[in-house]
Image (tube, rainbow, N blue to C red):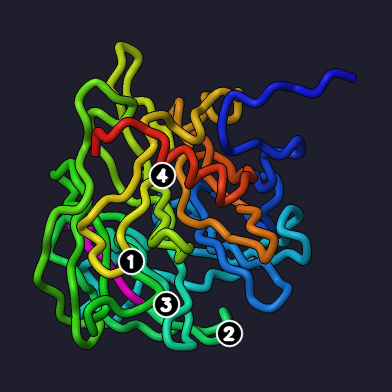
Amino acid sequence: MRKKFSYDIVRRWEGNPIITIDDLPFRCIDICNAGAVKVDEEYILLLTIQRLEGHYLIYPARSSDGYHFKVNDQPLLSPSQEEPYLIYEERGVLDARIVLLEDVYYICYDALGRHGYRAGLARTEDFKTVQHIGLISEPDTKGSVLFPGKIKGKYARLGRPWEGRSIWISYSEDLEYWGWSEVVISPRGGFWDSDRIGMATPPMKIDQGWLIIYYGIKQTSAGPLFRLGAVILDAENPTKILGRTNIPILSPREDYERIGDVSNLVFSCGAIIEPDDKVKLYYGAANSCISIGTTRVQDIVQACLESEKEF
């Protein structure tokens, strides 16, 4: 049999999608996006699920092989009923992104309330209970991620203002109060990410620096087209871009990526680098299911470094 040609650097698993609403042990409106982490030999996803009343909650799912998951029937992270979180999370918590930092797992998430979005931060040691740390951004900030290590002696975070088009970096001495903000990555006219960009996965440390997968949006006559690309940032100075893909590494092509709550969308909140340098990329498709694609670190790095320098 002739092997199917792959149009993307990230290759879809033939069993996609791996989680749909039919796999959930309860009723809901839909499922989208998943933070990902591997703890010992167990894969854990933190799924964004929209309940029937319209609020968003974050549920854990577990797997022994990274492909077949069982979703818990109870959320790991729900809108807080306590101040100061109450009014800022009343409409939901979503888009969890996980990093291991100083032997603790930190979860960045979007808090949604009547006043818009803010970035929230929580911590866990067992993915059974979580502790809120704080709301760590100015109003209307989405898609924040922590670096899994200090930079220049400070904690570092990437994120995008909701009304902005670029990704910014901010620093903190205590994980609660943030400042020293600078622009890092911006859209590029004429490219696949020409309209708006935002964070997908947390930064992953590789030999060349920090590897980051981000999403880019290009406006079309049929609406926005969401695709994924990659960028390498300098290990000591993350405002310095060492390489960036001029082509997407994953584009919506399959029906489950094109048809759903948000058409023509692939969107990731988590990837796992295996010991053999294989990358498992977990992504939401059309805001209606979870899928997985695989590639190699070297394939992404090569695409970043071989691109013409239009950073």
Judge from the rendering whether residue 102 lies leftward or rightward of residue 26; answer left or right: left
Indicate the position of residue 175 as horizontal and vertical percent values. Answer: 25, 82
Question: Disc 1 residue type?
Answer: Ala
Residue where numbered disc 3 is placed: 106
> In terms of depth relative to the viewer, which is nearer, 117 or 30?
117
How many residues crowd mark 1 within 10 Å: few (<14), some (14–19), many (20+)? some
Residue where numbered disc 4 is placed: 230
How many residues crowd mark 4 within 10 Å: few (<14), some (14–19), many (20+)? many
Question: Disc 3 residue type?
Answer: Tyr
- The range drawn in magenta is 115-121
Residue where numbered disc 2 is placed: 126
Can residue 182 be seen? yes
Residue where numbered disc 1 is placed: 235
How many residues crowd mark 3 within 10 Å: few (<14), some (14–19), many (20+)? many
- CA gap between label 1 and label 3 equals 20 Å
The first of marks 4 and 2 along the sequence is: 2
Q: Kindly identify the residue that appears in the image at 46 percent across and 54 percent down.
A: 269
Question: Disc 4 residue type?
Answer: Ala
The answer to whether mark 1 and mark 4 are in CB contact below 8 A is: no
The first of marks 3 and 2 along the sequence is: 3
The answer to whether mark 3 and mark 2 are in CB contact below 8 A is: no
Helix, strand or loop status at disc 3: strand
Question: Disc 2 residue type?
Answer: Asp
Q: Kindly identify the residue that appears in the image at 34 percent across and 64 percent down.
A: 145
The answer to whether mark 4 and mark 2 are in CB contact below 8 A is: no
